Image (cartoon, rainbow, N blue to C red):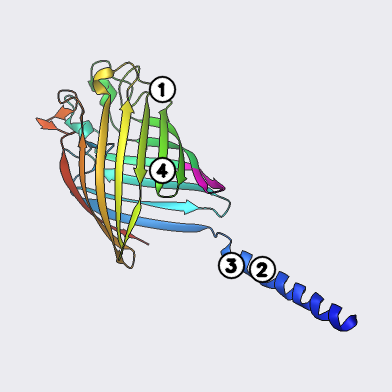
Amino acid sequence: MKKILVPSILALALGFVSGLAQAQAAAPESSLSFNVGAVSDYRYRGISQSRLKPAVQGGFDYADKSGFYVGVWGSTIKWIKDTPGVTKGATELDLYGGYKGAVGDVAYDVGLLSYVYSGNNYGNATAGGTKSANTNEAYAAVTLGPVTAKYSHAYSDLFGNTGTKNSYYLDLSALFDLGNGFSLTPHVGYQKFKNLEVATYTDYSLTLSKDLGNGLSASAAVVGTDADKSFYSLKDKFNGKTGAVVGLKYAF
């Protein structure tokens, strides 16, 4: 009996130690990452934020092993200063934080996001405008396989438009690995403006990305909307027109 029992106990002990080591190796670690890049046109929810011109962008993210995360991301923009009477607001800074987890095969992501347009006087110069274009949203997303659905809800007026609190954005996207570092991302979204129907629209895009290695990636996209031309035109430019966007990003 001893000859049978002792090897069995040793086998169980070794199995336990091996399993524990594997679990520790697979456990998520906290991370801090940075990114910088440039795009030929900064499109957000299908609308150009840079008057169909190039923009410089960058940010950083901290992801805790518990699932909580925070981040900052910024870009040069033109749409605020393009608005008649506005003299300040050449940058966008996004401050966000949330929690990511999973239930079975379904991953989820919930958080808060603030769009800060430093020093902007948007609301002071536009009829019916709010105090500024700064905006706060809450969001929730679920991912199953390659498909992600996300809902974003504004708990402030949306981008400087009075009476638009409780507006929302709903989008559906997918990420397909094509191999050899290539991926394809189709996307469709619906931006609903509360009490401002002329601003409500649908956007769509198709993005091809290429991982170039060593943190460098490139992308090319076709982006378009059915946005109202009169509402989304500034400086004689329709910022919701269908167009191509290329970008280059370095993450480290």
Q: Secondary structure at mark 3?
A: helix
Q: Residues in magenta?
A: 97-108
Crowding near the residue tagged with mark 2, few <14, some 14–19, many ≥20 C-alpha atoms within 10 Å: few
Looking at the rendered image, the disc whose residue lies closer to the viewer, 1 or 3, is: 3
Tag 2, which secondary structure? Answer: helix
Give me the residue at 46% from left, 46% from top.
Answer: 144
Q: Real-space Cα distance between discs 1 and 3?
A: 44 Å
State the residue in front, 112 or 229: 229
Q: Which residue is mark 3?
A: 25
Mark 1 to mark 4 CA distance (whole Å): 22 Å
For the residues bearing labels 4 and 2, Cβ distance under 8 angstroms: no
Which mark is in front, 3 or 2?
Answer: 2
**Residue at the spot x=84%, y=80% of the render?**
4
Which residue is at a point 30% across and 41% down the rendered structure image?
A: 187
Query: How far is mark 4 from mark 2, CA to CA?
Result: 32 Å
Q: Earlier in the sequence, mark 1 or mark 3?
A: 3
Amino acid type of the residue tagged 2 in the rendering: Gly
Magenta stretch: dominant SS?
strand
Q: Mark 2 or mark 4, which is nearer the start of the sequence?
A: 2
Quarter placement of the N terminus: bottom right
Please tell me how crowded label 1 is: few (under 14), some (14-19), or many (20+) other residues with Cα within 10 Å: some
Q: Report the residue marked by disc 2.
A: 19
Q: Earlier in the sequence, mark 3 or mark 2?
A: 2
- 150 in the magenta segment: no
Image coords of residue 245 (percent x, y): 19, 47
What residue sits right under mark 1 in the picture? 166
At which x and y percent is residue 158?
34, 26
Q: Which residue is mark 4?
A: 148
Residue 119: give x, y in percent of width and height.
30, 33
Any magenta on residue 100?
yes
In 3D space, how far apart are the residues under numbered discs 4 and 3 (Cα atoms)? 28 Å
